[in-house]
Image (cartoon, coloured by chain):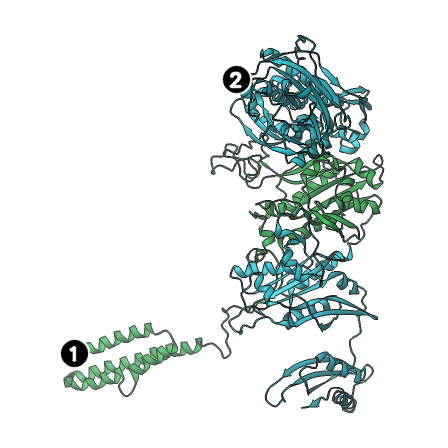
């Protein structure tokens, strides 16, 4: 048979390996049974086998075997005690399992943004009003200095009703409003200056669907009227609004434009966030000749040819946000305000367009598909 | 409008750098769509509808002349003398629609244009045809006057009649299309028939070709709405119609012919055969507008130096008379957009520079009234529904007629659009539900199972018209998925509970009554009612969507969708708002008694509750059904209904006898009224 001394050494090694390998309390009990069981345990088997050793070796081997047995017992006891200590208390839960979440819905991003815009203007002292989505020609066009056959009517292709329908205002409506600007008229017809309001709501145009157009969208109209209200006030209010919504780092400019119901008219542009107003995307670090960190002044000479230009602003460095202007005297005359005494400004913006700019949404149609995977990206 | 840099620089001195030219003009109100830097250099401007005078190079040159403070380099055309006295008879019958009509006969040699001319037209985006047609287009692109050349030999009777088209009259236009005209359109006719649609397009029969030797050159001013109607009705938009419908210059027709005549002579393409015929029955007076310095400052919020007024307005073509405080400004014919002082202030402001206007904040003279209650309430409603797990959807207000019909009251039809985008968007929605169901179906097709959506918006009921509503749709699981829970599909009482909770937010309780609706499953449909005094108003509808409707909108068969719709005017009218008084907390303990009774299965719970309420003393403060059991121990056709009753005295602690007496009364009433047996 094998040398008992050697058998002793290899048993120790084997034990140490198994002990290391034992992970759970039941593993440890298994090891204990295998080594220390009175019947059939490896240690008692070893002790028995000593009987076959030469007589003069027996005392020394016996001592060694007893030491080994004591070591094994001690090691196992220590591990079992440690394991018992580590055993979770009764009623322990697995804290890593997912919790039961109350089901909470999500706000539609357009309603979220509308409320944000209302919040800003409310702090600026604006009243929020709503009105009918069905309108008559007078409030949608004529009172806004767009008589029949006015070429500016082409700017807003209109959806008409087959026969008049009663509107929320109780009037016989003939069309779906193309803008919320009609609310200017509805409010001024019933109220005297001063006026400071916004009118958010849905509007309709006969536009085919594409990445930036849907036949229904959401607009916020604004109107301020008083004695001595000027283009400078328009600039102040809209700059404060644009900076609050898009961030203080944005540059803001007014650019002359045309709307039939304002004179002078202006578009409000903000500097492009993608290129920092440079008109082209920033070169790799170290290659920027100006070396300026952060936002550069918007590009004075624009390059809408687009070659190498910023795709977001088509190389101009600027992004159009909303239309505005000083209320046209003909509008004041239509509602019985004296245009010599009162001046005012108006503005209108599409919430979808602002949402596209603010959140980087690439397709306006997503707002009307109501895909939960889209809606759930926004706050409850 | 494609403006050719090289062409523009012939009319006024401008910077050689095309990007600078584009940027500066862009800041004056001419949005730049594209730039082509390759010579001759093109800037494509988007010209707003109010500035037809800038649909040509001269108009843009005037703007540049202010920007770079340099005069126009325009010399009067060298007009050749007529070789004879051949004229065409012009019969102007409708001066309202054509205030001025000029014509002159030219003897011409038709040939291809020289390269400089055809190159320039091509750069400006116009296809060259022959020297005669090209010169008319050149003049239009240079100074804005659209013109037309007729082959005189092909005009019957050698005369031109400007009249309304006859009903049923037809004309083959230059593009080869046979067009049916009507009396709303103005035409140029010869002795027998229409030969051009005024200001829109000429006719094929009188077209110039290689055999033409004598032409009549037309240069007119047409009434914008007449051209616009003609163009719209024919679906025909041309370079000429675009200019005329925005407003043409009443002074330009003779100048246009003079310019063309000079070019014909210069190119040896033709000479006038007779004098100009100018039909101009009623000359308008000069347009004068007063401009006040103080008014400029008031509108712009920025004082402008008085010298800036003539500096800006004169190069733009305005006559400016007056001192430092006030001016009489004479408006040139080509500025059809300028009729009042504000229009002039815009001109001054544009060139003074909007960037030099300071930013101010208008003072608030008085506090604003509180927001309209409907806005506050819609916000609260939105919060309540989101807290109940519903996500907010927005769907279109116009839908398919077939989808709308089941949601209309019997016999009623949804409101039709006159010019819908397509059949899919043909009618105004009578309910928010069709759109919401479609939104659920869209999600369902994209592997979403548990869907809760709501929408707040306008609906358009046949009869009553536009109104505000809120709709809910729920399909899939009744609760969020979790490893510890068994999935249960949504049922009637889940969505009813949401409505109860939501209405409780507004302090409203509703009665629920079985109902029938074309779009709801039979036996699982109800109307909700609110009562105030003797009035009983329908607040809304609730139930399971009819499976056939669900399947038609793309839902898998066998899946149940529960829907509800509330009339917001009813909900908000019933809301007491903030008129609330806090009640003191009860001072005495309450006593709870549970009772189980056997009643017929068909007996509504509301009837049991009503009997309990009417037979109980005022100390009964709450009734809650907490179990409904059928099965072992309950006879067929009956249910065991368990109700928890809570009693409390307002002025003392109730004794056991008090409660027992009340319970005895209740049980005997239940027995007598419903045959209820206590278990």
Q: Reply above or below: A363 against B620.
A: above
Q: Quadrant of the C terminus of chain B?
A: bottom right
- On screen, residue B244 above or below B500: above
Q: Which image quarter: residue B194?
A: top right
Tag 1 residue: A3
Q: Quarter-wise, where is residue A72 in the image?
A: bottom left
SS under mark 2 = helix
Colour of the chain lettered B: cyan
Provide residue A64's location: percent of width, then percent of height.
23, 80
Give x and y (percent) for residue B166. 72, 32
Quadrant containing the N terminus of chain B is: top right
Seen from the viewer's position, the closer of residues A225 and B536 is: B536
Give the number of the mark in front: 2 or 1. Answer: 2
Q: Which residue is drawn at 32% across and 75% down?
A: A19
- Please give the name of the residue rendered at 83% of the width and 45% of the height, measured from the top-left corner: A189
Q: Name the residue under label 2.
A: B115
Q: The green chain is which one?
A: A
The correct choice, above or below, for B44 with respect to A121 in the image is above
Residue A285 left/right relative to B23:
left
């Amino acid at each position: 048979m094998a040398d008992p001394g050697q058998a002793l050494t290899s048993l120790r090694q084997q034990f140490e390996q198994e002990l290391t390998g034992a992970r759970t309390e039941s593993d440890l009990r298994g090891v204990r049974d295998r080594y220390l069981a009175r019947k059939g345990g490896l240690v008692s088997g070893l002790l028995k086998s000593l009987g076959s050793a030469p007589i003069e070796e027996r005392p020394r081997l016996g001592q060694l075997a007893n030491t080994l047995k004591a070591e094994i017992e001690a090691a196992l006891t220590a591990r079992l005690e440690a394991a018992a200590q580590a055993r979770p208390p009764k009623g322990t839960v697995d804290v890593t399992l997912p919790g039961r979440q109350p089901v909470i819905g999500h706000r539609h991003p357009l309603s979220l943004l509308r409320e944000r815009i209302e919040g800003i203007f409310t702090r600026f002292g604006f009243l929020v009003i709503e009105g009918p989505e069905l309108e008559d020609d007078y409030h949608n066009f004529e009172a806004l200095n767009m008589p029949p056959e006015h070429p500016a009517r082409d700017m807003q292709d209109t959806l008409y009703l087959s026969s008049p329908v009663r509107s929320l205002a109780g009037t016989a409506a003939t069309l779906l409003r193309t803008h919320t600007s009609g609310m200017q008229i509805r409010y001024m017809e019933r109220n005297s200056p001063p006026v400071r309001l916004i009118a958010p709501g849905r509007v309709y145009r006969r536009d085919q669907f594409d990445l930036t157009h849907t036949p229904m969208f959401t607009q916020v109209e604004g109107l301020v009227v008083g004695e001595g209200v000027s283009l400078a006030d328009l600039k102040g209010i809209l700059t404060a609004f644009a900076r609050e919504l898009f961030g203080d780092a944005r540059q803001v400019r007014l650019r002359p434009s045309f709307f039939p119901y304002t004179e002078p008219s202006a578009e409000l542009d903000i500097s492009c966030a993608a290129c920092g107003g440079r008109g082209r995307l920033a070169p790799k670090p170290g290659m920027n000749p100006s070396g300026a960190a952060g936002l550069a002044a918007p590009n004075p000479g624009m390059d809408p040819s687009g070659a190498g230009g910023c795709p977001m602003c088509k190389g101009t460095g600027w992004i159009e946000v909303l239309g505005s202007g000083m209320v046209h005297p003909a509008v004041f005359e239509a509602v019985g305000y004296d245009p010599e005494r009162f001046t005012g400004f108006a503005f209108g913006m599409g919430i979808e367009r602002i949402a596209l700019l603010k959140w980087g949404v690439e397709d306006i149609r997503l707002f009307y598909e109501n895909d939960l995977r889209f809606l759930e990206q926004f706050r409850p | 409008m494609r403006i050719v840099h090289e062409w523009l620089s012939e009319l006024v001195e401008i910077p050689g750098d095309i990007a600078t030219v584009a940027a500066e003009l862009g800041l004056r109100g001419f949005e730049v769509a594209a730039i082509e830097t390759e010579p001759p250099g093109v800037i494509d401007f988007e010209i707003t509808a109010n500035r037809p005078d800038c649909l040509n190079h001269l108009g843009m040159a005037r703007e540049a002349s202010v920007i770079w403070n340099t005069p126009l380099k325009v010399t009067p055309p060298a007009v050749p003398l007529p070789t004879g006295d051949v004229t065409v008879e012009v019969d102007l019958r409708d001066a309202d629609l054509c205030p001025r009509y000029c014509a002159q006969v030219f003897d011409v040699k038709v040939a291809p244009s020289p390269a400089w001319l055809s190159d320039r037209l091509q750069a400006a985006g116009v296809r060259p045809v022959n020297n005669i047609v090209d010169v008319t287009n050149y003049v239009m692109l240079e100074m804005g006057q659209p013109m037309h050349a007729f082959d005189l030999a092909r005009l019957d009777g050698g005369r031109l009649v400007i009249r309304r088209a006859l009903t049923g009259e037809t004309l083959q236009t230059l593009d080869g299309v046979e067009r049916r005209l009507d009396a709303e359109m103005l035409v140029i006719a010869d002795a027998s028939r229409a030969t051009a649609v005024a200001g829109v397009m000429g006719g094929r029969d009188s077209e110039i070709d290689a055999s033409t030797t004598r032409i009549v050159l037309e240069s007119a001013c047409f009434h914008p709405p007449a051209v616009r109607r003609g163009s719209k009705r024919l679906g025909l938009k041309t370079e000429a119609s675009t200019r005329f419908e925005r407003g043409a210059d009443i002074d330009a027709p003779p100048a246009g012919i003079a310019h063309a005549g000079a070019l014909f002579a210069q190119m040896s393409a033709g000479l006038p055969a007779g004098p100009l015929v100018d039909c101009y029955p009623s000359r308008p007076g000069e347009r004068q507008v007063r401009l006040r310095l103080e008014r400029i400052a008031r509108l712009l919020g920025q004082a402008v130096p008085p010298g800036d007024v003539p500096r800006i307005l004169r190069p733009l073509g305005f006559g400016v008379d007056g001192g430092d405080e006030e001016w009489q400004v004479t408006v040139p014919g080509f500025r059809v957009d300028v009729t009042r002082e504000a229009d002039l202030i815009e001109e001054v402001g544009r060139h003074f520079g909007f960037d030099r206007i300071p930013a101010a904040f208008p003072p608030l003279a008085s506090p604003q009234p509180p927001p309209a209650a409907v806005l506050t309430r819609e916000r609260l409603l939105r919060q309540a529904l989101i807290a109940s797990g519903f996500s907010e959807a927005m769907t279109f207000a116009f839908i398919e007629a077939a989808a709308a019909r089941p949601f209309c009251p019997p016999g009623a039809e949804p409101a039709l659009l006159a010019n819908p985008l397509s059949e899919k968007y043909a009618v105004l929605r009578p309910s928010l539900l069709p759109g919401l169901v479609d939104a659920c179906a869209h999600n369902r097709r994209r592997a979403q199972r548990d869907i809760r959506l709501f929408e707040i918006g306008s609906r358009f009921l046949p009869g009553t018209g536009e109104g505000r509503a809120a709709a809910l749709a729920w399909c899939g699981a009744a609760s969020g998925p979790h490893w510890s829970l068994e999935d249960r599909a949504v049922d009637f009482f889940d969505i009813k509970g949401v409505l109860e909770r939501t209405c409780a937010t507004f302090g409203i309780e509703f009665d629920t009554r079985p109902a029938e609706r074309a779009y709801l499953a039979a036996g699982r449909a109800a109307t909700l009612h609110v009562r105030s005094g003797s009035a009983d108003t329908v607040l809304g509808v609730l139930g399971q969507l009819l499976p056939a409707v669900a399947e038609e909108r793309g839902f898998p068969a066998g899946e149940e969708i529960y829907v509800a719709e509330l009339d917001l005017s009813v909900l908000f009218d019933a809301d007491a708002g903030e008129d609330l008084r806090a009640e003191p907390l009860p001072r005495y303990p309450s006593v709870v008694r549970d009772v189980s009774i056997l009643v017929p299965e068909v007996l509504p719970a509301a009837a049991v509750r009503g009997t309990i309420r009417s037979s109980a003393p005022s100390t009964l403060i709450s009734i809650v059904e907490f179990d409904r059991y059928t099965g072992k121990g309950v006879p067929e056709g009956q249910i065991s209904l368990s109700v928890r009753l809570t009693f409390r005295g307002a002025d003392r602690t109730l004794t056991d006898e008090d409660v027992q007496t009340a319970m005895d009364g209740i049980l005997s009433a239940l027995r007598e009224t419903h045959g209820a047996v206590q278990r």
